[in-house]
Amino acid sequence: MKTAYLGLGGNMGDVQNAMGSALDTIHNHKGVTVSAVSPLYKTPPWGVIDQPWFLNCCVAVETALPPMPLLEICQQAERAGKRQRTQRWGPRTIDIDVLVYEGVEQETDTLTIPHPRMTARAFVMLPLADIAPNLVVAGKPVLNWVDGLDTSELQVAQDSSWWPV
């Protein structure tokens, strides 16, 4: 079993429910167990800023699946949550990214691990610090990355007891 970290976000519809359903799908898949869940954060949009605020969180999973099959499970959960890919960084019901996968660094057209922009995003690093503060990403612990980011607008919307429901 390997540990992987996922980032979840969304800003359309009932995002908390969509995230919970996605985690149910992931957790109930053979070979994957959700082992830690961060609080939900209300966060300003990133990239395309003329849109509603997001809910974001990070989760740790223990998995026997290699990275690509894990990504496929995440994409299945997105499709079940009615994710439509219409605009990069635009509004969405749910988005799930594989952020880090234990012992793997890779760059393909489909999946780059660690996620290439994660260390610049407070909405990723702050919830990740809640569940894995000492995880080393790109040579530094997650907590050190958080220290260099502006987290002033991020608000805890729900503590880590939000899942499982």
Image: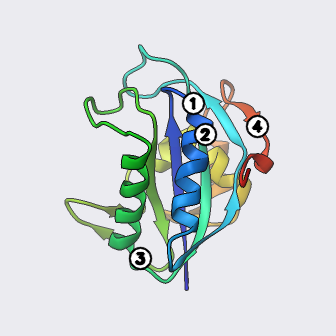
Residue under numbered circle 3? 104
Which residue corresponds to mark 1?
A: 14
Q: Earlier in the sequence, mark 4 or mark 1?
A: 1
What's the distance in space between the residues labelled 2 and 1, CA to CA?
5 Å
**Do residues under tags 3 and 4 come within 8 Å of each other at their CB atoms?**
no
* Circle number at residue 150: none
Q: Secondary structure at mark 1?
A: loop
Q: Which of disc 4 and disc 3 is earlier in sequence?
A: 3
Amino acid on which disc 1 is placed:
Asp
Residue 60 placement: quadrant: bottom right
Q: Can you see residue 117? A: no
Q: Callout 4, which amino acid? A: Gln
Disc 4 crowd rating (10 Å Cα; few below 14, some 14-19, many 20+) is some
* 88 to 124, vertically: above or below: above
Does the CB distance between marks 2 and 1 fall below 8 Å?
yes
Which residue is labeled 2 in the image? Answer: 17
Q: Earlier in the sequence, mark 3 or mark 1?
A: 1
- Asked whether 92 or 147 is in front, the reply is 92
Q: What is the quadrant of the N terminus in the image?
A: bottom right
Q: Quadrant of residue 48?
A: top left
Using the rendered image of the protein, determine whether residue 12 is visible from the camera's viewpoint. yes
- Where residue 59 sits, quadrant-wise, is bottom right
Q: Which residue has dot 4 on it? A: 158
